[in-house]
Amino acid sequence: MLSTTEENYLKALVHLSVEKGIKDAGTNELAGVLHLKPATVNVMLKKLREKKYVTYEKYGRITLTSAGRKMAIEIIRKHRLWETFLFDKLGFDWDEVHEVAEQLEHIQSKKLIDELDRFLGFPMVDPHGEIIPNAKGELKSVPKQLMSSVEEKKSYVITGVKNDETSFLKYLEKLGCRIGKSFRVAGIQSFDRSIEIEMEGKSTLITSEVAGQVYVRPRRVS
Amino acid sequence: MLSTTEENYLKALVHLSVEKGIKDAGTNELAGVLHLKPATVNVMLKKLREKKYVTYEKYGRITLTSAGRKMAIEIIRKHRLWETFLFDKLGFDWDEVHEVAEQLEHIQSKKLIDELDRFLGFPMVDPHGEIIPNAKGELKSVPKQLMSSVEEKKSYVITGVKNDETSFLKYLEKLGCRIGKSFRVAGIQSFDRSIEIEMEGKSTLITSEVAGQVYVRPRRVS
DNA sequence: ATTATAAGTTAGATAAGTCTAACATTCATA
DNA sequence: TATGAATGTTAGACTTATCTAACTTATAAT
Ligand SMILES: [Mn+2]
Ligand SMILES: [Mn+2]
Ligand SMILES: [Mn+2]
Ligand SMILES: [Mn+2]
């Protein structure tokens, strides 16, 4: 049985690899996302290596073993199912669910999570548009496009966010950007890559920093 | 913010007082219910006293302060609401809910628990028939019913006794009747109003004299 | 009242997870 | 290829929560 702490390390390794696109990580990167010091991470890595959840050697890179990846995906499944529960059943806003799911994801009960899944109707995606791994630990991947790669004059739908933090989500909220909303790209400034979008009749400016954290898919216009 | 450990100590103190009927406890008793050593409890008591959650002095008895009691009742509220969720919504059996609720009761989010309460329809009692404290921390008492007025085929929980003579209590003990125990009414003899109950798989006969001295409350069954 | 037993306390050890400060290695590039 | 910056490691300290073993106080029985 893994501790909450150990679970958080494994989950962070998956997130790092998904977000950075590389399968291995460094001590400093991992420390960064966990808000811990590199020295702390180094101690824990030896333990996770001992337990065969990661592969790594002194001064080398960190890779999840298949056992480690399996564990991490289970945590992510729990996290996203709980977010869905909070959003769908308890009326939480999409920017409020993450913090509580960070706690709920560590509850240990296979029956609990499988029954929750059923109760929610086996949802495919969480309130942020992230795919929920199924009970077999399969993370069905769907091609993703970042808002920063949109083209002028075309229309898109917001499908997800790369970043779950409340402050970011609140800002998106203020901009009127929610999952499922459609917009048209009015123009892109070449010097700062900022994007002017039209959404529900209103024109809004999106900085390249924000556009790099938002997923979209092209919209077929009738 | 209290740690999970501290919360468990406070909760155990309420349970001790409710079950033993006395408002104070000793180090050994508390250690017993927490499955810890008296030495361990002694260390923690100093910390809880420092934080003003309990009153106690060296070699003396332990009493919750009103702040301590308030905290403990919040944990109990959360525990019982989660048990109700697991039972009503996720199809858990009533003997499976406790273990998972022991984990869920420590999740920190006021909004979560208040919304859960609403989602469940502000239930009054948990699947074991225990009263759920409301959001204000009030443990609303529920009208009492004597065992002599039960109906056939229904399930009940024993909630108290009208008579606390030793001989009577010893007799109840021998019958396996304790506060908190559940039973189902198998049948009622009309000529002497004696009651045949099923408790923990065993069938027991309760005379009308005894039934008139025991309080019960209906139990919801799946 | 004395003493044996039960209840309670203390000190010191251990384990997990974190930190800081000092040290070591690797890497980029001048 | 030499060297400074970035990255990674180690040692030692701290906190929380637990234990065992030894000690002290209170209580009950003789
Ligand atoms: Mn977590
Ligand atoms: Mn999410
Ligand atoms: Mn608990
Ligand atoms: Mn209960």
Image (spheres, coloured by chain):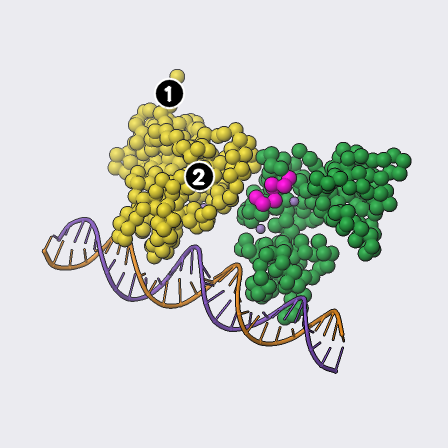
Chain colours: A yellow, B green, C purple, D orange
Rendering quarter of residue B204:
top right
Residue in the image at 61% along x and 50% along y: B75
- For residue B116, which numbered disc appears in the image? none
Left or right? Give the position of B82 relative to A101. right
Q: Is residue A107 above or below residue B24?
A: above
> Does the magenta-highlighted stretch encompass residue B186?
no
Circle 1 crowding by C-alpha within 10 Å: few under 14, some 14–19, many from 20: few
Is residue A207 at all visible to an observer of this figure?
no
The image shows a total of numbered marks equal to 2
x and y percentages locating residue B183 in the rendered image: 73, 40
Left or right? Give the position of D14 relative to B134. left
Q: Does the residue labelled 1 lie within 8 Å of ligand 2?
A: no
Residue in the image at 34% along x and 38% along y: A18
Left or right? Give the position of B105 relative to B136. left
Where is mark 1, residue-wise?
A220
* Residue farthest right in this picture: B191
Q: What amino acid does circle 1 point to?
A: Arg
Q: In this view, does A217 lie above or below B170?
A: above
Residue stretch in magenta: B94-100
Ligand 4 is found in the corner quadrant, namely top right
- For residue A74, which numbered disc appears in the image? 2
The answer to which of B70 and B24 lies nearer the viewer is B24
Tell me the subunit letter for badge 1: A
